[in-house]
Image (cartoon, rainbow, N blue to C red):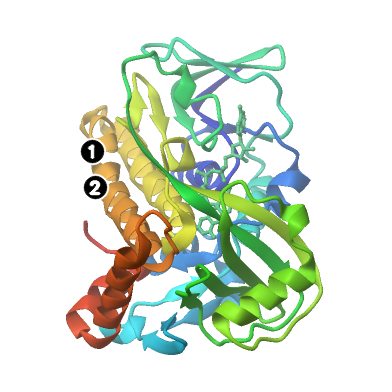
């Protein structure tokens, strides 16, 4: 088998890259180790930056998002028991965010892919990458796919990053001593906008996926046992940290660890890493999915330029072009996380610094604008 671009992983990065290349007339094959059902139902991110939403529309997969996505013009920061609105659109010349679940983005991309007939293989086994310097090949389930280029879009635990020889990558990493216990509940959101709450018992977040589905989180230990959190305990903890809210049936419950991670450079030979395969952010800044889409936009443009002109300059500059945005998002995500989470190591001094920062961000237009432009996504980094 032969194709122009072999794409490993059918998450947001791989599927969006496949779509962009297909529309530019570049053949590609997507290989995914999980089942379609699994990929379509993984509950993850839900905040799309303006630039992400615009790209999905341009790629012809934004129609349902435009119909069902909920546009938000602000977020709330809660501390000392009071809520303060950060008017995102007012502070960023009218830019906004769209609430539309990653599950829905992935479903739309898969539907478009199946309609176009471009190859997308689920449940492929034993994926391995070979000869990445010159003539890349992807082996899977007893078959071999030759390609001009390979896009490693297989997430943090995929095979692409570990296929790069030792000593090539520089890794920057930070683990946090806490995590999020999240629930998805079949109940209308208790707040019109997202509420990020600082509380002495720990951080909490009121979020949503749709007018009927709430997504709610409380800060817990990174190794918290979800069995210790029956539904009533989760609702009670949310009420304590955020205030009164409407309860409903809990459809999903899980603990997510928090990590910052960057692998540099995001390329080796003819292998290009994109999305979580190259970098991870803690979810507080709502950046993971948006970064994955920003990477593949740059990668698709570089690949198209290479096929059109034979000039490798943009492909060679891929990693540097992505890393500017990646590091901005790494800092923003770390900063939001540090400002809002209870940190026992930082003690009372740390808590007072957090409160001072929160007061500053909610009273100074300059500070609020900095948060807002990062949250909706910087156009230029
Ligand atoms: C539990 C959880 C909650 C999250 N919550 C948020 C949030 O609230 N906000 C936010 O912004 N971000 C969140 N994120 C991050 C966000 O979901 C990711 O940044 C985003 O999914 C990245 O997309 P991706 O395509 O790079 O990787 P992924 O979505 O991880 O996709 C990678 C794909 O590759 C496949 N794959 C893996 N190994 C192989 C292999 N060997 N061969 C073939 N295929 C393979 C995987 O099955 C997967 O489908 C969360 C992540 C997790 C894990």
Q: Is residue 290 above or below residue 150?
A: below
Q: Count neighbours of disc 2 (C-alpha within 10 A) and say few if under 14, some if 14 to 19, many if 20 or more.
A: few
Q: Is residue 377 visible?
A: no
In the rendered image, residue 46, in percent from the top left (x then y), is placed at 56, 64
In the rendered image, residue 212, in percent from the top left (x then y), is placed at 72, 80
Q: Which residue is mark 2?
A: 324
Q: Is residue 21 above or below residue 315?
A: below
Using the image, tell me which numbered label, if any, was put on residue 378: none
Q: Which residue is mark 1?
A: 320
Q: Count neighbours of disc 1 (C-alpha within 10 A) and say few if under 14, some if 14 to 19, many if 20 or more.
A: some
User: Disc 1 on helix, strand or loop?
Assistant: helix
The quadrant of the picture occupied by the C terminus is bottom left
User: Disc 2 on helix, strand or loop?
Assistant: helix
Q: Is residue 197 above or below residue 107?
A: below
Assess whether mark 1 and mark 2 are in contact (beta carbons under 8 angstroms): yes
Residue in the image at 27% along x and 54% along y: 328
Pick whichever, 308 or 317, lies toward us: 317
| Residue positioned most to the front | 348
In the rendered image, residue 131, in percent from the top left (x then y), is placed at 44, 10
Image quadrant, ligand 1: top right
How many numbered tags mark residues here?
Answer: 2
Rendered image quadrant of residue 317: top left
Q: Is residue 284 left or right of residue 120?
A: left
């Amino acid at each position: 088998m032969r194709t122009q671009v072999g794409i490993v992983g059918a998450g947001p990065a791989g599927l969006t890259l496949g779509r962009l290349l297909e529309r530019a007339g570049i053949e590609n094959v997507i290989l995914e180790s999980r089942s379609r059902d699994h990929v379509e139902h993984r509950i993850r991110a839900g905040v799309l930056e303006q630039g992400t939403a615009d790209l999905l529309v341009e790629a012809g997969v934004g129609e349902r998002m435009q119909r069902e996505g909920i546009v938000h013009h602000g977020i709330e920061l809660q501390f000392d028991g009071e809520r303060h609105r950060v008017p995102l659109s007012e502070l960023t010349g009218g830019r906004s965010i769209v609430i539309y679940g990653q599950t829905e983005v992935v479903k739309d991309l898969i539907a478009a892919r199946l309609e176009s007939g471009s190859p997308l293989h689920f449940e492929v086994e034993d994926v391995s990458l070979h000869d990445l310097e010159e003539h890349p090949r992807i082996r899977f389930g007893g078959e071999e796919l030759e390609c001009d280029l390979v896009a490693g879009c297989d997430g943090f635990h995929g095979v692409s990053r570990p296929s790069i020889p030792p000593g090539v990558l520089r890794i920057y990493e930070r683990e946090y001593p806490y995590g999020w216990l999240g629930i998805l509940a079949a109940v209308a959101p208790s707040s019109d906008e997202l509420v990020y709450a600082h509380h002495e018992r720990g951080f909490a977040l009121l979020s949503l996926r749709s007018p009927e589905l709430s997504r709610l989180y409380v800060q817990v230990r990174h190794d918290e046992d979800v069995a210790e959190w029956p539904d009533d305990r989760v609702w009670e903890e949310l009420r304590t940290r955020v205030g009164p809210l409407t309860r409903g049936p809990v459809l999903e419950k899980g603990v997510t660890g928090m990590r910052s991670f960057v692998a540099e450079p995001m390329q080796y030979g003819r292998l290009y890493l994109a999305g979580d395969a190259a970098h991870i952010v803690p979810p507080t800044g709502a950046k993971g999915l948006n970064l994955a889409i920003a990477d593949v936009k740059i990668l698709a443009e570089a690949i198209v330029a290479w096929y059109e002109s034979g000039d490798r300059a943009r492909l060679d500059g891929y990693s540097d072009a992505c890393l500017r945005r990646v590091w901005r998002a790494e800092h923003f995500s770390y900063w939001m996380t540090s400002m809002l989470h209870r940190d026992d190591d930082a003690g009372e001094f740390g808590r007072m610094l957090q409160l001072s920062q929160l007061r500053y961000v909610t009273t100074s237009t300059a500070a609020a604008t900095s948060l807002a432009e990062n949250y909706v996504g910087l156009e230029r980094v």
